[in-house]
Amino acid sequence: MDVNVILSERIGMNEIRAILHQVKNDDRLKQDLYDLTIHNEGMAGYQAAWVLTHFTVRENQWLLLKQEELIDTLLLCQHAGKKRLILTILYKLPFELLRVDLLDFCLGHMVSGHELPGVKSLCMKIAYELCRTVPELMQELKSLLDIMEEEQTPALITTKKSIFNAIKKGKSLQKLTIPH
């Protein structure tokens, strides 16, 4: 199966399911999808990232080994849709170490007037997970959330409320099934 050819054309959920079925027991195909996500700035790279967002817990465990490179790719990504997909992939993985560059990225992009709501929302959630155990960082995050524009989309308002509720409870927003 040449995923580059398949993903160079417009695909839908049927094609994604077929690819996911193929990847289950094929690490080479997983690697091909991953490589397209990391190295291809076109349609195939975007759609490969879309497929990765549908990985099962087992495949996400495989992706956990690639978390650092996914973060590096995110930090350089200019494609808004692909940025959202990479953030989605990262949000499904546990954050074991604080990467200050990822935190800076998320804090900056969650308040950016130029970002799409999906990117802002995911940046807010990831920033919360990164700040959760560090009181000084949590205070900075709360301050940023407080000063965010009031003219927000319903999704951003809901995300903000969820974060403040999670802060009160001292809990994570992530529903991880990958051990960390």
Image (tube, rainbow, N blue to C red):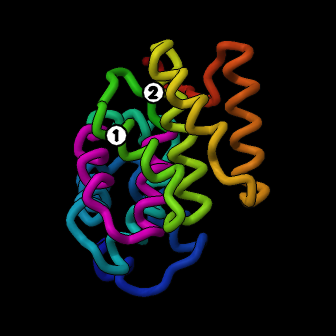
Q: Is residue 96 above or below residue 39?
A: above
Quickly name the residue at label 1: 102
Query: Dot 1: within a 10 Å radius of its alpha carbon, few (fewer than 14), some, or many (20 or more) residues?
Result: some
Q: Is residue 52 above or below residue 173?
A: below
Locate residue 73 relative to residue 174 in the image: left or right. Answer: left
Q: Give residue 144's mark.
A: none
Asked whether residue 54 appears in the rendered view, the answer is: no
Q: Is residue 58 above or below residue 177?
A: below
Q: Is residue 37 above or below residue 2?
A: above
| Callout 2 amino acid | Leu
Judged from the image, the secondary structure of the residue bearing numbered disc 1 is: helix
> Main structural element of the magenta stretch: helix, strand or loop?
helix
Q: Quadrant of the C terminus?
A: top left
Residue at x 58% of width, y 31% of height: 143
Quickly name the residue at label 2: 130
- Residue that lies at the very extreme toward the bottom in this rendered image: 9
Q: Which region of the structure is painted magenta?
A: 66-91
Locate residue 88 relative to residue 164 in the image: left or right. Answer: left
Cβ atoms under marks 2 and 1 closer than 8 Å: yes
Residue at x 70% of width, y 40% of height: 160
Of the image marks 2 and 1, the number of the one nearer the N terminus: 1
